[in-house]
């Protein structure tokens, strides 16, 4: 089960089966599907022979160097396999995590929320009810702009307060904006109105495109909604993940999240909206969900939401750029099903019973996009397992002109589109 992890209420999720069913009409709404790995082309015999010779030479050189270093170390009384050496490695790693926690922790806040909901009693009479929740946020600017998850500050939120790393509680906090419930990015922004004389430390935002599987990462957050700045470490164990997350309360409502980092750094309820940080102390992701009892966490790559961050910092409001199409994210299976030569991209599927494939009045319609078009690139970046259409769009701001590479009737062409603000709701 996959959970966004604010506390309370707890969140859960289920894996959505692969298929070509289109979701309800929205500004973004891609079809989720399982991904497949593109097979490599076999090398020629000559290339294999040359590569084998090169590898053999490298092995000899590395072995000689390692052997000399090992003998020298042994002669000096140092054994890489000794308990002392292993202890030194552990000590160095602990110092690294400690340093990251100290430097980044000042930019992480606990978020406490009260929200108003309506419930029905046993007689079917609606009654107002106040819910308390807690999550985590990351300071973006010195004047108090904070990023968190939208499920941390749900619809109906009445009051928000944040607690700084030094224990200072700031009560005058407003919700600048939340992405729509149908948006695949679970993001919200808060603004501290009264700093009470405190000097804030903005986080350093990194480049998530440089992240690789196996990279060391640290997660910081308000675990269980009770503790400040708990710190866990692990590695990036995958990327390009797509999941569906739902509410453990039994509600049928779910949210589809795309292009996520997967990490084994322990992430707990209450860590929602907290940072995933690299070894340089840079925020490369915003923690958003966990898989129950599997020690698997998911984070939104920060590059995918840099457009949203820039929009809020510049204009003080949240505007989500969109094209206005309904599409299928192509895999080998979908390409075969739709009889397409193109294997990767965003296919604007026709005959959509849930609504028009191209939203009337949308940027896509104005630019002349058509059903059966396959969008393969945005500004030269390919749409594939690691970069969905919606994640690439999230890197731009409203009003930006982008160039789409579109395969139409088997031929590629360039189409310029000016991105507009997505409809709210």
Image (cartoon, rainbow, N blue to C red):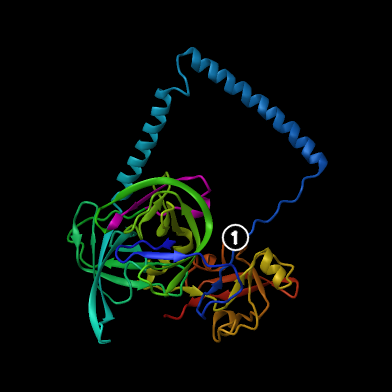
On screen, residue 43 above or below 147: above
Q: Position of residue 337 (x, y in %)?
A: 70, 71
Q: How far across and how far down the image is residue 321, in percent? A: 49, 73
Quadrant the C terminus occupies: bottom left
43 vs 377, left or right, is right
Q: Residue at x 34, y 51 (%)?
A: 220
Is residue 83 one of those drawn in magenta? no
Relative to 172, does residue 269 appear above or below in the rendering? Answer: above
Q: Residues within 10 Å of mark 1 (few under 14, many from 20)?
A: many
Q: Is any atom of residue 207 visible in this view?
A: no
The stretch of residues the image draws in magenta is 204-224
| Residue 308 in which image quadrant | bottom left
Image side of residue 116 versus residue 386, left or right: left
From this view, report whether residue 415 is shown above or below residue 104. Answer: below
Residue 284 picture quarter: bottom left
| Mark 1 lies on residue | 385
Front-most of residues 283 and 15: 15
Q: Nearer the viewer, residue 18 or 341?
A: 18
Please tell me whether mark 1 sits on a helix, a strand or a loop: loop
Residue 361: percent from left, percent from top: 54, 86
User: Which residue is at a point 62% across and 26% down the rendered structure image?
Assistant: 62
> Can residue 117 be seen from the camera position used here?
yes
Residue 168, percent across and down? 18, 56
| Residue name at image x 27 percent, y 59 percent | 225
């Amino acid at each position: 089960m996959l959970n966004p992890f604010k506390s309370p209420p707890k969140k859960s999720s289920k894996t959505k089966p692969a298929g070509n069913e289109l979701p309800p009409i929205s500004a973004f709404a891609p079809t989720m599907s399982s991904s497949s790995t593109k097979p490599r082309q076999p090398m020629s015999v000559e290339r294999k022979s040359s590569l084998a010779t090169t590898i053999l030479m490298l092995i000899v050189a590395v072995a000689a160097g390692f052997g000399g270093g090992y003998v020298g170390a042994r002669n000096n009384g140092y054994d890489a396999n000794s308990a002392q050496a292993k202890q030194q490695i552990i000590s160095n790693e602990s110092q690294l995590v400690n340093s990251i926690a100290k430097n980044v922790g000042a930019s992480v806040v606990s978020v406490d929320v009260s929200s108003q909901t309506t419930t029905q009693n046993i007689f079917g009479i609606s009654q107002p009810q106040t819910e308390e929740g807690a999550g985590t946020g990351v300071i973006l600017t010195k004047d108090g702009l904070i990023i968190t998850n939208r499920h941390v500050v749900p619809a109906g939120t009445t009051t928000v307060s944040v607690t700084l790393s030094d224990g200072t509680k700031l009560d005058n906090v407003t919700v600048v904006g939340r992405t729509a419930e149908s948006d695949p990015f679970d993001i919200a922004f808060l603004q501290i109105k009264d700093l009470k004389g405190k000097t804030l430390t903005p986080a350093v935002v990194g480049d998530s495109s440089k992240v690789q599987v196996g990279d060391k990462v640290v997660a910081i957050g308000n675990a269980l909604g009770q503790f400040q700045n708990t710190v866990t470490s692990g590695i990036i164990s995958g990327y390009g993940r797509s999941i569906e997350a739902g509410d453990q309360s039994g509600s049928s409502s779910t949210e589809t999240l795309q292009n996520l980092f997967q990490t084994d750094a322990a992430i707990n309820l209450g860590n929602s909206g907290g940072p995933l940080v690299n070894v340089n102390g840079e925020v490369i992701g915003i923690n958003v969900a966990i898989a129950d009892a599997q020690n698997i966490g998911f984070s939104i790559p920060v590059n995918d939401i840099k457009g949203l961050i820039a929009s809020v910092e510049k204009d003080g409001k949240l505007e989500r750029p969109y094209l206005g199409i309904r599409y299928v994210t192509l895999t080998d299976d979908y390409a075969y099903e739709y009889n397409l030569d193109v294997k990767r991209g965003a296919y604007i599927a026709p005959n959509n019973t849930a609504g028009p494939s191209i939203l009337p009045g949308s940027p896509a319609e104005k630019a002349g996009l058509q059903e059966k078009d396959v969008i393969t690139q945005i500004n030269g970046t390919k749409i594939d397992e690691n970069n969905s259409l919606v994640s690439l769009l999230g890197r731009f701001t409203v009003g930006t002109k982008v160039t789409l590479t579109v395969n139409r009737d088997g031929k590629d062409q360039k189409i310029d589109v000016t991105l507009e603000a997505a409809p709210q709701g």
